[in-house]
Image (spheres, rainbow, N blue to C red):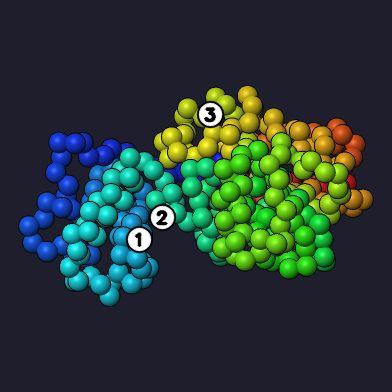
Amino acid sequence: MTKGDWWLVAGGWGADHESPITSHQSPVTPSTLLRTTTDRLAAAGVPDPQVDAEWLLAHCLGGRRVDLALQARQPLTSIQQRQCEQFVTRRLRREPLQYILGTQSFYGRDFRVTPDVLIPRPETETLVERALAVAKQPLQMLDLCTGSGCIAITLALERPAARITATDTSAAALTVARENAARHEIQERIAWFEADLFPPSPATYDVIISNPPYCPEAVWPTLQPEVRDWEPQTAVVSGNDGLALLRRIVQDAWRWLRAGGVLALEVGDDQAAHVVRSMETTGHYTALKIHRDLTGRERVITAEA
């Protein structure tokens, strides 16, 4: 079980290898560089090597992927060539493309990402969709394990009348989250707390939402290097079976929910039934539902308090 779709890369260029980019004697154009970079990434085992090559080259040129064709025959400067080589080298070292680019799209918006935060995954959009389905009026909403802040910020943007509280144990992650809130100009509508799950001050909420760590400890060493070597382990792993934080949330969330309030959780593969049983055992939740993501996996659980 992994936390989302991971990227596969292998290999790299040793110190005794001359850079395929800077070793060209003739002028280097985006067209030629795209071919050589695609070949290098393909040889390294990168899925969709041309797509990655396009993203890296567009990032180097300060434009968009769709603009590459317009610049296909325009020679790159030596500075641009060196920068492109740095980006390609980082990718060949299995650094996630999102960290190299510095952003990841989520729910149609760009969010800044660094190795201090988990890279937002497409399946988490299902979690947001389920929360939005119940958040149709002015609401108080709590996002646990906020990371980059993509969930809290998306909720705030999609429900302008809502008030959002978000927590994380990582001060570094909260710094990134606040930067993302400022980027989307909603910093005044979200209260951020460095806390172990629930905020320090008592309150009740209409919706509690969380995409917590849910990977078992034993799985961590087997994950692709893009995850294991770059993403924060504390944002991925949660106990021997991956359910440690999910159990804590289930045990305590009802105390923070108003009557009829909704708890929405993202879970890992084969975890939905376990979490539902935990909810049933507490005796504090009703209307339990399991929702599948776009790949058909049981990914989100919602329940009322």
Residue 32 spot, x, y in % from top left? 18, 62
Q: Residue 206 sits in which quadrant?
A: bottom right
Residue 6 spot, x, y in % from top left? 47, 43
Task: Write down the residue under mark 1.
Answer: 59
Mark positioned earlier in the residue sequence (3 or 2) = 2
Camera-side residue: 90 or 284? 90
Camera-side residue: 212 or 130? 212
Can see residue 276? no
| Relative side of 24 to 280, left or right | left
Figure check: 251 above or below 287: above
Residue at horizontal 87%, vertical 34%? Answer: 282
Camera-side residue: 166 or 298? 166
Q: Are marks 1 and 2 in contact (CB under 8 Å)?
A: yes
Spatial CA span between label 3 and label 1: 33 Å
Q: Nearer the viewer, mark 3 or mark 1?
A: 1
Residue at horizontal 33%, vertical 40%? Answer: 93
Task: Write down the residue under mark 3.
Answer: 219
